[in-house]
Image: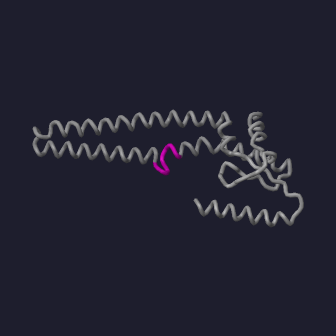
Amino acid sequence: MKFLKLASIIALLAFFTFAAYSADLKIAYIDSERILNESQDYKDAKKILDDEEKEYSRKGRQMELDIMNIQDEIEAQSLMWSEEKKLEKQQEYQQKYMEYQQYLQEIWGQTGKLYQRNLELSKPIIDKINVVIQKIGEEEGYDLIIDAGMGVLVYAKPDYDLTNRITEELKKK
């Protein structure tokens, strides 16, 4: 990740150095995070994702409770059980624990259901935003539009901020 930021900075510096020798470079920036947070489509998608995550969390808490109940039962009853019964309950505990771990990975893992669902819900919104940015960039002759929300932009005059323009254009659609 650090390499990508460094490469971005180097590329921007190279571009600005080259652009300094050319005439009339037109640059602007946006704050993609603010654009998303002000987008009703994004708010709706976030609510859908939050609701789905609550349901997954509810199921996960129930699985945890089941595991704790088995553990409590083992602790309370194991002295009265035969070795076979102890082994059976320990295996049941291990099985439930493994199922729980698998569930966590399946839902919240790097390529889990919530990650995939987030991509599914956010891609059309981001595509729509990118279309508006490109339209404004082309219509108004910008050579470069930088995303301040990505953390690369350190300083820029507010005059060059197109964020409000983008959010207004999105509200029209």
Q: Which residues are magenta?
A: 109-115
> Magenta stretch: residue 116 in it?
no
Q: How is the image coloured?
A: one colour
Q: Quadrant of residue 57?
A: top left
Q: Residue at x 39, y 38 (%)?
A: 60
Rendered-image quadrant of the C terminus: top right
Please provide percent x and percent y for residue 6: 64, 63
Which one is nearer the viewer's eye here, 66 or 31? 31
Which one is nearer the viewer's eye here, 97 or 25? 25
Which one is nearer the viewer's eye here, 102 or 40? 40
Judge left or right: residue 85 versus residue 68: left
Outermost residue toward the right in this view: 23
Please provide percent x and percent y for residue 102: 38, 47
Q: How many marks?
A: 0
Please provide percent x and percent y for residue 128: 71, 43
Q: Is residue 43 above or below residue 97?
A: above
Q: Residue at x 47, y 34 (%)?
A: 54
Q: Is residue 27 above or below residue 47?
A: below
Q: Quadrant of residue 20?
A: bottom right
Rendered-image quadrant of the N terminus: bottom right
Please provide percent x and percent y for residue 26: 84, 54
Q: Is residue 105 above or below residue 20?
A: above
Q: Residue at x 30, y 43 (%)?
A: 96
Q: Residue at x 85, y 47 (%)?
A: 139
Judge left or right: residue 91 versus residue 51: left
